Image (cartoon, rainbow, N blue to C red):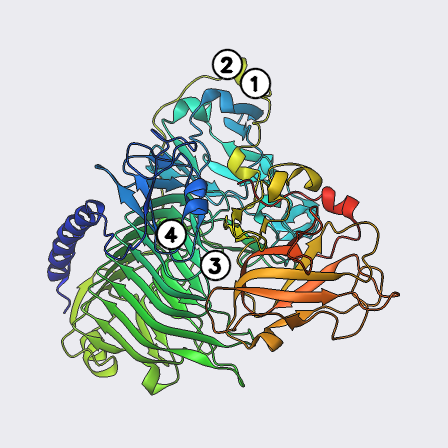
């Protein structure tokens, strides 16, 4: 009844096509046709940050320095063949691409190749079972989502205990504290005690560090393997605004996302290779059971939130713990979200848990939906075959997934899937759920291959297995009149089995406790801070702050004192705290805040100052300084000046809390004559309680090192 031989021949044909397309993608030349500004060259093998970066002969060394220099319309070009172990944030309006000859430039989240004997020491040995457990001496990595051996020949299994809010415990018995010497019960299992992660709450990834333990029964891992790469909890590239293009870059070994974006316009990823992504813990659930006490994540390319003009073209994306490519937003959030003009075209997406994932839900009273969405000429193959099979929930692998049926109703229109391949999934091949007929995609000319007896699809509100009726399901229920269907034998869940061949004896040196690494430069800072210049008001020059010191008062030097850099934030209202104001309350003084910002709201509603009655707030009521001196509020980047007036003699303030509906790149404080004020003060996003005084602000770990 089922022609399995025909299915096998089709798979062999697709294997050859996949290999050909991967080679083409890897050898694609850089496309700089949209670059209108200067080219800035970066090379870790030949660069120096004292260079001007304006030619191949004078490249900069660091991507951050290049990003700081770049302006909208410019291109930051990374040297082909170079390996950058420095994830970064991309700047609005800038293209990031490659120059030179050879392989694409590579971004690794992994801070170091761990195949060094001196980087491991033995902490546990059981001579009866042969178990050897080793500690890696770098305790500064954020939560490691995966470990890969010998150029990804194999990988370690992450041991995932539960957490009760204060300590690691066993999921089935939370009264018992977790003991990794017992639970690392097979070779190449590992446990990362990134014990600053709090149950039920995702905190700053930079705080979630701790010792990493790997069971390696064949000896010191640094001797057994030629390469060991880690997936710490970082994004390879964080998208910091609109009109950004990522072209011809390879990204690997990031425990969060390969490329992470949210609320963007005109965002393009093309000619890129992205693989071995994800696995880090997003959050713990204190009340969870053995299957859901922790959420692990990691997508190749993600847009979380609204997007208008989101393109992924000619990319090879594979081995992602979660999704290869995705646009998504919480179905619970009470906010607007539009996902318009999306293209996933000419891509090879393989071996992720979901090769394509999207979801969005309707919320009464809010504008939520999307239009003009096209998936075309894209191969989605072997969903659930990769390292993401090591998941707590153990199911739901799909070549295309659209959230949870009955929850994410996906209100999209003008949605098309054309000439794509959906080739095998260990669970369900195609899952496209929506109760709305108009939100179903128009399917045309796609190829479907699935194991007999496996789930074939969930389409609309109907689930179907792979059986003798599948061809009719494709043509009649899914509407793909030109679709092709092929069958293979039933597909079992992916069984990972990696055996280590080499074995080395344990030496006395292996038992010596090693000193910890010094904190690598790139890990002294949080991962998502764009280094934007700010214009001063008095002479129009560009200044920036150092931010590489332990004391706020030492961070500012010379004429740069009043300039500062803060991260892009996409929240509908962002709260900024002005930290480091004088100890003596400010009275009867006019203070002006200058923002380099943009907002789609009229500025009289976009800008607000938090009014408080205690010594840390502004006294004087709702009119205390919300007047704007200029700015149009038309969605474009502009300088906005806000006047703060302390008011009567009795009014004073020692901190300023500013609300702004939009995106901010820089701030500075001035008086009415344009003179810089309060050199020790700066604005930062208030993601925690305000600092009560300058002393506590000084003790705060600075966000970035530019």
Distance Cα–Cα, label 1 vs label 2: 7 Å
Crowdedness near tag 4: few (<14), some (14–19) or many (≥20) residues, C-alpha within 10 Å: many
Crowdedness near tag 3: few (<14), some (14–19) or many (≥20) residues, C-alpha within 10 Å: few
Q: Quadrant of residue 150?
A: top left
At 47% across and 69% down in the image, what residue appears? 329
Q: Is residue 212 visible?
A: yes
Residue tagged by mark 4? 320
Using the image, tell me which numbered label, if any, was put on residue 254. Answer: none
Residue tagged by mark 3? 393
Using the image, tell me which numbered label, if any, was put on residue 507. Answer: 2
Give percent across and percent down for residue 11. 16, 56
With respect to residue 141, does 7 lie above or below?
below
Viewer-proximal residue, 167 or 90?
A: 90
Give percent across and percent down for residue 3. 12, 64
Q: Earlier in the sequence, mark 1 or mark 4?
A: 4
Q: Earlier in the sequence, mark 2 or mark 3?
A: 3
At 85% across and 64% down in the image, what residue appears? 614
Mark 3 secondary-structure assignment? loop
Residues at circles 3 and 1 in contact by the CB criterion of under 8 Å: no
Distance Cα–Cα, label 1 vs label 4: 35 Å
Q: Earlier in the sequence, mark 4 or mark 2?
A: 4
Viewer-proximal residue, 355 or 110?
A: 110
Please identify, in this view, whether the residue under mark 3 or under mark 1 is nearer the observer: 1
Using the image, tell me which numbered label, if any, was put on residue 511. Answer: 1
């Amino acid at each position: 009844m089922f022609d399995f031989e025909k299915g096998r021949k089709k798979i062999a044909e697709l294997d050859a096509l996949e290999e050909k397309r991967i080679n083409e993608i890897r050898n694609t030349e850089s496309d700089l046709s949209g670059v209108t500004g200067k080219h800035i060259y970066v090379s870790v093998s030949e660069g120096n940050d004292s260079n001007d970066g304006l030619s191949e002969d004078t490249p900069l060394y660091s991507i951050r320095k290049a990003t700081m220099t770049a302006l909208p319309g410019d291109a930051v070009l990374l040297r082909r063949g170079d390996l950058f172990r420095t994830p970064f944030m991309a700047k609005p309006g800038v293209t990031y691409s490659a120059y030179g000859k050879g392989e694409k430039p590579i971004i690794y989240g992994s801070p170091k190749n761990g195949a060094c004997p001196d980087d491991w020491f033995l902490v546990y040995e059981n001579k009866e079972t042969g178990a050897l457990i080793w500690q890696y001496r770098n305790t500064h990595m954020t939560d490691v989502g995966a470990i890969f051996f010998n150029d990804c020949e194999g990988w370690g299994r992450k041991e995932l205990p539960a957490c009760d809010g204060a300590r690691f415990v066993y999921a089935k018995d939370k009264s018992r504290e977790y003991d990794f010497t017992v639970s690392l019960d097979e070779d190449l299992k590992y446990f990362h005690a990134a014990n600053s992660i709090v149950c039920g709450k995702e905190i700053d990834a930079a705080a979630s560090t701790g010792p990493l333990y790997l069971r390696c029964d064949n000896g010191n891992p640094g001797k057994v393997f030629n390469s060991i790469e880690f997936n710490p909890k970082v994004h390879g590239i964080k998208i910091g605004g609109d009109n950004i293009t990522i072209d011809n870059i390879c990204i690997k070994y990031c425990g969060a996302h390969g490329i992470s974006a949210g609320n963007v316009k005109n965002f393009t990823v093309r000619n890129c290779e992205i693989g071995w992504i994800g696995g880090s813990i997003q959050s713990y659930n204190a009340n969870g059971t053995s299957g859901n006490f922790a959420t692990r994540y990691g997508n190749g390319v993600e847009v979380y939130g609204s997007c208008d003009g989101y393109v992924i073209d000619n990319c090879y994306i594979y081995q992602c713990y979660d999704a290869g490519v995705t646009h998504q937003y919480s179905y619970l959030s009470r906010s607007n979200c539009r996902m318009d003009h999306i293209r996933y075209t000419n891509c090879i997406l393989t071996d992720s848990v979901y090769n394509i994932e999207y979801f969005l839900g309707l919320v009464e009273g809010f504008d939520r939906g999307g239009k003009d969405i096209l998936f075309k000429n894209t191969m989605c193959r072997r969903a659930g075959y990769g390292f993401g099979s090591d998941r707590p929930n153990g199911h739901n692998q799909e070549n295309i997934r659209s959230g949870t049926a009955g929850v994410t109703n996906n209100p999209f229109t003008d949605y098309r899937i054309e000439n794509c391949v959906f080739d095998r999934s260990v669970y369900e091949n195609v899952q496209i759920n929506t109760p709305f007929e108009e939100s179903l995609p128009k399917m045309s000319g796609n190829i479907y291959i699935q194991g007999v007896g496996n789930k074939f699809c969930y389409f609309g509100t109907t689930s179907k297995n792979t059986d003798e009726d599948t061809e009719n399901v494709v043509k009649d229920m899914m509407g793909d009149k030109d679709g092709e269907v092929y069958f293979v034998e039933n597909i079992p869940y992916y069984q990972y089995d990696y055996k280590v061949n080499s074995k080395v004896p344990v030496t006395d040196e292996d038992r010596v406790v090693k000193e910890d690494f010094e904190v690598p430069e790139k890990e002294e800072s949080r991962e998502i801070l764009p280094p934007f210049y700010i214009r001063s008001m008095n002479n129009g020059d560009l200044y920036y702050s150092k931010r590489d010191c332990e004391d706020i008062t030492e961070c500012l030097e010379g004429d740069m004192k009043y300039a500062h850099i803060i991260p892009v934030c996409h929240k509908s209202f962002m709260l900024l705290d002005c930290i480091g104001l004088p100890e003596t309350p400010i009275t009867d003084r006019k203070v002006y805040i200058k923002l380099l910002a943009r907002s789609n709201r009229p500025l009289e509603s976009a800008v607000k100052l938090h009014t408080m009655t205690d010594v840390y707030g502004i006294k004087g009521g709702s009119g205390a300084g919300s007047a704007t001196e200029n700015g149009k509020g038309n969605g474009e980047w502009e300088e906005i000046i806000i006047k703060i007036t302390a008011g009567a003699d009795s009014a004073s303030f020692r901190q300023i809390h500013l609300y702004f509906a939009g995106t901010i790149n820089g701030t500075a404080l001035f008086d009415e004559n344009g003179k810089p004020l309060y050199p020790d003060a700066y604005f930062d996003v208030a993601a925690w309680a305000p600092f009560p005084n300058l002393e506590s602000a000084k003790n705060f770990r600075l966000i970035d090192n530019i």
